[in-house]
Amino acid sequence: MRASRESESGSSDTEERSKGGVNAEVVNKEVINKEAVNRDSPRPNVVLVSLLLATLVAWSGLDAVSVAPNRIVPGQGHAAWDVAGWPGFLLSLVPMLAVLALAWRPDRRRLRWALGLAVAMLAALPAWLALASARLVDADLPQARMGVGAGVWVALFLLLLALIELRTRLALPRTLGWSLLLVPLASLAAWLTFGLAPLALRQEFLTRRDGFIAAIVEHLLLVGAAVGVSLVLGVLLALAMRRWARCRTLGFAVLNFLQTIPSLALFGLLLAPLAWLGAHVEWLAALGVSGIGAAPALLALVGYSLLPMVRNTFVALDEVDPGVIDAARGMGMSRGQVFRQVRLPLAAPVILEGIRITTVQAIGLTAVAALIGAGGLGTFIFQGLGQAAMDMVLLGALPILVMALIADALLGALTDLTRQGEAT
Amino acid sequence: MIELIGVSKRFGDTTAVDDISLRVERGELCVLVGTSGCGKSTTLRMINRLIEHSDGEIHIDGQQIRDFREETLRRRMGYAIQSTGLFPHWTVARNIGLVPRLLKWPPARIRKRVEELMAMLGLSMEEFAGKYPRQLSGGQAQRVGVARALAADPDILLMDEPFGALDPITRETLQHELRELQSRLQKTIVFVTHDMDEALRLADRLVVMDGGRIRQQGHPLELLREPADAFVESLLGGEDRGLKEAALLTVGERMMPLSPRLLPRERISRHATLREALSMMLWRHAERLAVVDDEDMPVGELSLRQLVGAKHHE
C-alpha cells in the first residue's frame, strides 16, 4: 500500500516534470521568437562536414585507380575524371555535396537522407571501379591489371567513418548499423562476379585461391587456439591470484614483462629453446614442436594474450559489489553457489570484454607469426612486401582487418547481451 | 530466542567484541546501537557466522550455532543489509525467492510465497515482479530486501542498518512499516543502527554498545530515565532526552477524563505521542487539547500540566 502511494507520487512527479519540460519548450520558443533568430535547425554537424570535405578533396586530388600492363611493371595512376570524363566526374560529386548540405543543417529527417546517400555511395564504389576497368584497361592485354588507387581507398574509409557518425547520431541499434553494410557488400560481390576481372586484388586471389583459403583457416586456428588456451589458463591464473596475494604480485609482474617484449623478439627468443626441445624430446617432436612453425607462434601468442585475459578476469571477479556477496553468503548460499550464481554472472561482461580485446589483438599478432613459418594470412603480407606487390599485401591485410572487425562486433554484441539484465 | 554468553571476537591483537552477554526473547525487537566501530555489526554477523566468534557461546533456541552447518544456519535466519545486496542480474521476484529456492521448495510454492510477500510489503506484482533492482527507488529496493529476508518465514531476522542509505522520509515510513509488520509477525529481530532516533522508535530492547562492550541494555524508557553513565546519556541525546521520552509515550497514557469545562477546540488522537501533543500546544498556543478516538469522538482531555508533570499520575 505504501509502495503504491510512493509510485503514485512518483508518477505525478514525472507528470510535473513533463509539464515542466513543455513549459521550458514554450519559453524557449518565445525567446526565439522574441530574438527573431532563426534557430529552428541546429548547428552544422562538424564531424560529418569535415569528413565529407576530406572525401571531396581525396576523391578529386588523389588517383582513383592505377593500371599496369602486367604484374611486374609499376602501374600508371588515373584521376577520377579519367575514369568517367569531366561530366561523369562532376556527377560523382553530387551525392557528396548533397550529404554536405544535409549535414550543414542536420535534423533527424535530413540525417536519414544522408545515411541513405552514404550507403548508396559505398554501394556505388565497386560500380565505379568496374567503369574504370572497362574504360582504362586494354582488353587486348590479358595480363593487364588495375589497382585500387589512394583516392578510392580514402573515400571508402572516410565514408565508413561518416556512416558510423550517422549511426551514432541517429541512435540506430548495433545490428541495424551492421546490416546497413550488407548493401555495399552485396554490390561488391555482384560486381566481382560479373565485372572487374582486371582488378589486381581479384587476380592475386584467383592465382592463390587454395593458398588463400588455407591461410585463412590457419589464421583462424592459431587465433582460436591462442584465445582458447589463454582463456583457460587466464581464468585459472586469475582464480589463483584471488586466493594468494603473492601469486598476484608475481603473476602480474611476469605478465607485464612478457607484454613489453616486442613480438618479433619473443618469436626469436623462443626459437632456440624450442628447436632444442624438438630435437631432443621425441614426443614433442612428434607433436610438431620445433624452432619455427606453429608451436612457437602459439606459445608467443598465448604469452601476449594472457595479460589482458588475466587482468580483465581478475578485475571482473574482484570488483563485484561486496554488499551483494555479503548478502549472498548471509542468505545461506554455499561458496560454490555464490561463485556460480552471483560472482561469475556479474563478472561475465568484463570477462567477455577481455576475450574481445584478446581476440582482436591475437588476430593482428598472428600476422607477424608468419615470419617464423606459422602460416596464416601474414604469409601474403610478407611475400607481397618482398616482391613489392602491394596487391598481395592487401590480399593478406584486408581479411585480417575484416576478421578483427567481425570478432569485435560479435563479442561486443555478446557482452551487451550479458549486460542486458542489469541495464535499465 | 537468541542468547549470547560471554562472547568475544578478536582480530589479531585487537578485540572487536569483548565478553558480551545478551538475551533476545522470542518476538522481541532488539536494537544494537552505538558509534561506528563499537562492535555492533560484528556482534550481528557472529550470530549468522559470517564472522566466527573467538570465545563464549551463541545459542539459537537453546542450540549452539556451531552445531549447525553454516548454510543451514543462515537459511533459518533472514538477513537484510544497508546496501540491500539485491542481485543486480536477477529480477525482483527471483531475488525474493532466493532462500526458498536454496531450500528446494517446489516452484509453485515459491511463486505463491513471493506473491504473498510482495503484497505484504505493498509492492504490486504486475509492476515490480519483472523489474531489475537498478530500476527501483531506494525505498522500493529496501522493501524487496526485507521481503527477501522474510521469504522462507524465518523465526529470526538480522538487519544491519537496513535503512541507513535512505532519505529521512522514506526511512521513517519503512520504520513505521517494520513496527507494524513486527506486531503481526512477532519475529525475533536483531537490528543494528547508529541512528538513536531510529533505535528508540523501533526497540523493545535497546542495547548501547561502546568499545566492544555493552554499556547498558533494557527498555528504551528505562535507558532514557536512568542512563547508566555519561556516555549513554550523551548518546541518548543529552538535553533532548525529555523530547525523546515524550516521543515514546502516547497521549492516551496521560489524558484525563472529560471535565465539565468547555471542550478545547484543538484536537489530538489518543494514539499520538506526547511529543506531537506538545508540538501542537506550542504551535496553537493552547494549554489544553481535546483527545479524540479513531472515530474523532472526544474521549478525554490533556492539559500542559498533565503532559509535563504528572508525576502523581504514574
Image (cartoon, coloured by chain):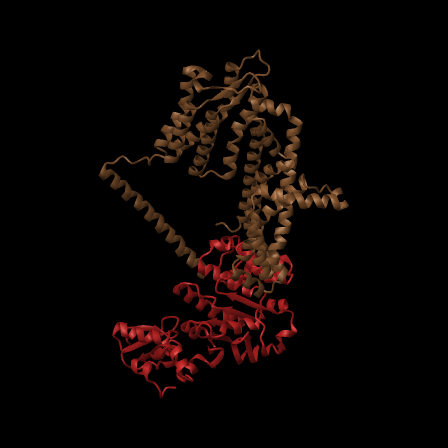
Q: Is residue A108 left or right of residue A200?
A: left
| Residue B233 versus residue B197 in the image, above or below | below
Q: Quadrant of residue A71?
A: top right
Q: Colour of chain B?
A: red
**Residue A408 x/y as whole percent:** 55, 40
Q: Is residue B67 left or right of residue A360?
A: right
Q: Is residue A346 visible in this depiction of the protein?
A: no
Numbered disc total: 0
| Residue A181 versus residue B294 in the image, above or below | above
**In the image shown, does B142 or A139 lie closer to the viewer?**
A139
Q: Residue at x 58, y 75 (%)?
A: B53
Q: Is residue A225 left or right of residue A323?
A: right
**Residue A404 x/y as whole percent:** 56, 38
**In the image shown, does B253 or B265 lie closer to the viewer?**
B253
Q: Quadrant of residue A342?
A: bottom right
Q: Is residue A36 visible in this depiction of the protein?
A: yes
**In the image shown, does A27 or B49 lie closer to the viewer?**
B49
Q: Residue furthest right?
A: A282
**Residue B163 x/y as whole percent:** 45, 66
Q: Residue furthest bottom?
A: B312
Q: Residue at x 44, y 75 (%)?
A: B34
Q: Residue at x 60, y 66 (%)?
A: B75
Q: Colour of chain A?
A: brown
Q: Residue furthest top?
A: A140
**In the image shown, does B218 or A144 lie closer to the viewer?**
A144
Q: Residue at x 62, y 62 (%)?
A: A335
**Residue B91 x/y as whole percent:** 54, 54
| Residue A59 versus residue B53 in the image, above or below | above
